[in-house]
Amino acid sequence: AQSVTQLGSHVSVSEGALVLLRCNYSSSVPPYLFWYVQYPNQGLQLLLKYTSAATLVKGINGFEAEFKKSETSFHLTKPSAHMSDAAEYFCAVSRGSQGNLIFGKGTKLSVKP
Amino acid sequence: KAGVTQTPRYLIKTRGQQVTLSCSPISGHRSVSWYQQTPGQGLQFLFEYFSETQRNKGNFPGRFSGRQFSNSRSEMNVSTLELGDSALYLCASRLTSGSLSGANVLTFGAGSRLTVL
């Protein structure tokens, strides 16, 4: 069975500081991994995805994530936080060939001025 | 290119009623999936439709159903509403069914927020 654990339901950083959102996955097969962002009263927007190519994945808005098989992790980072990054972030794993996503519980990111 | 369009955006129902939500996928996308988002359970997969056929189903009771039309538009229906059905219902479309590889990624709509009183 596949599952996703996001460590920390709330993360607060200062503007300009490093953003690190943690995600660990459990999968019996090589996973496809995704990070989505959700702004208030909106749907989910894809930030980046890992589908067994390069282990360091670059996404939109300056975010990137590194797939580490030995640690079963796919943490999301951004070198310098911006006020507009305040949102909820979801890590997800796909269920093999079926294509539906299993989501983590989400991490709400706050950015202080 | 228009995104995924969901209607209505907000609606209020009472217990025991039924509700129908609509989703128009991105042009050219033939697969439509539905997810439920609640504060307690988070994001959970409901079902996926492709070529007017349900291809995959999550762990929800039979009160939750869906269908897809020949133009790929999809509807989901919830009958005999319960308080716990209050949620944001998200529709997502992609090119085809199968694995989420390459360009076949899910694009989500803004959701339909259902409140059951």
Image: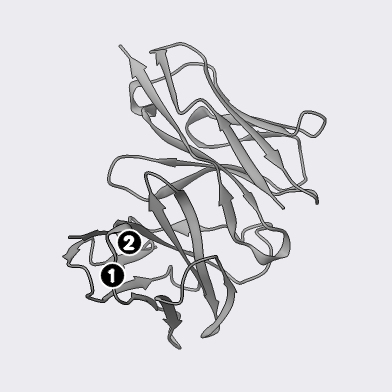
In-front residue for pair B18/A14? B18
Q: Is residue A51 above or below residue B93?
A: above
Q: Residues within 10 Å of mark 2 (few under 14, many from 20)?
A: some
Task: Give, as a three-letter code, the residue at label 2.
Answer: Asp
In the rendered image, residue B43, in percent from the top left (x then y), is placed at 46, 51
Position of the C terminus of chain A, as image quadrant, is top left
* Residue at screen point 44% across, 72% down: B27
Q: Is residue B48 above or below residue B12?
A: below
In the rendered image, residue B58, in percent from the top left (x then y), is placed at 55, 66
In the rendered image, residue A83, in percent from the top left (x then y), is placed at 33, 22
Task: Give, as a three-letter code, the residue at label 1.
Answer: Leu
The secondary structure type at the circle numbered 2 is helix
Please state if B60 lies on the left or on the right of A85 as rendered. right
Mark on residue B85?
2
Task: Tell me the subunit letter for badge 2.
Answer: B
In the rendered image, residue A73, in percent from the top left (x then y), is placed at 70, 31
- Kindly identify which residue carries mark 1: B81
* Residue at screen point 23% across, 61% down: B9
Q: CA distance from mark 1 to mark 2?
A: 6 Å
Residue A70 placement: quadrant = top right
Asked which colour scheme the image uses, the reply is one colour
Residue B96 placement: quadrant = bottom right
